[in-house]
Image (spheres, rainbow, N blue to C red):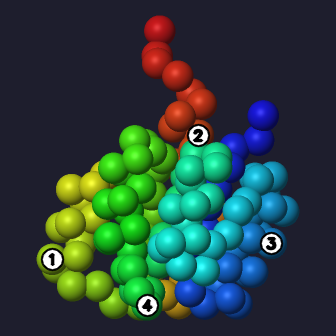
Amino acid sequence: MRQTILVVDDEEAIRRLLTESLTRAGYRVAAAGSGREALALVEQEPPDLIILDLVMPEMDGIEALRRIRERGVTAKVLILTAYGTAQQIREARALGVREFIGKPFDLDRLVGIVRQELEEDTRGLPG
């Protein structure tokens, strides 16, 4: 079964670019333009990985992630941001974020990070 990625970004061009690139890389991709839309999609089908913009109107990435975690979703999360405060980074790390990717980003590098994060789940335990 193909792994599912949820792309959450208020910029339509970024959502489209990531959706097309990750679909070509073999993943199932859902996209949301807001934190609220992301919450609805997560409730329908929890993804394996979430690519989440940090700065969005109405509900920022940290608040969206907090609410996603409250729903028991344990997906890995990559944060996209043009800028982020030290406080936001601390909060994101406390919510399980390991990777932060700056905007503008290198698409090949981002797809490589996604692949690496998801392969960790499929390798299993050694021995």
**Image disc number at residue 87:** 1
**Image disc number at residue 20:** 3
* Kind of residue sitting beneath label 1: Gln
Q: Is residue 68 left or right of residue 90?
A: right
The answer for how far apart the CA atoms under marks 3 and 1 are is: 32 Å
Residue at 47 percent across and 9 percent down: it is: 127
* Kind of residue sitting beneath label 2: Glu
Circle nearer the N terminus (3, 1): 3
Circle nearer the N terminus (2, 3): 3
| Label 2 sits on residue | 119
Residue at 50 percent across and 72 percent down: it is: 36
Secondary element at image label 4: loop
Secondary element at image label 2: helix
Q: Tell me if mark 1 has few (under 14), some (14-19) or many (20+) residues whose alpha carbon lies within 10 angstroms of its own.
A: few
Location of residue 21 (image quadrant): bottom right
* Kind of residue sitting beneath label 4: Pro
Say above or below: 29 vs 11.
Answer: above
The answer for how far apart the CA atoms under marks 1 and 2 are is: 30 Å
Q: Nearer the viewer, mark 4 or mark 1?
A: 4
Tell how many labels. Answer: 4
Please say if the residues under marks 4 and 1 sit with CB atoms less than 8 Å apart: no
Q: Nearer the viewer, mark 3 or mark 4?
A: 4
Q: Is residue 49 left or right of residue 70?
A: right
Secondary element at image label 1: helix
Circle nearer the N terminus (3, 4): 3
Circle nearer the N terminus (4, 1): 4
Q: Residue furthest right?
A: 24
Image location of residue 13, percent across then percent down: 70, 90
| Label 4 sits on residue | 57
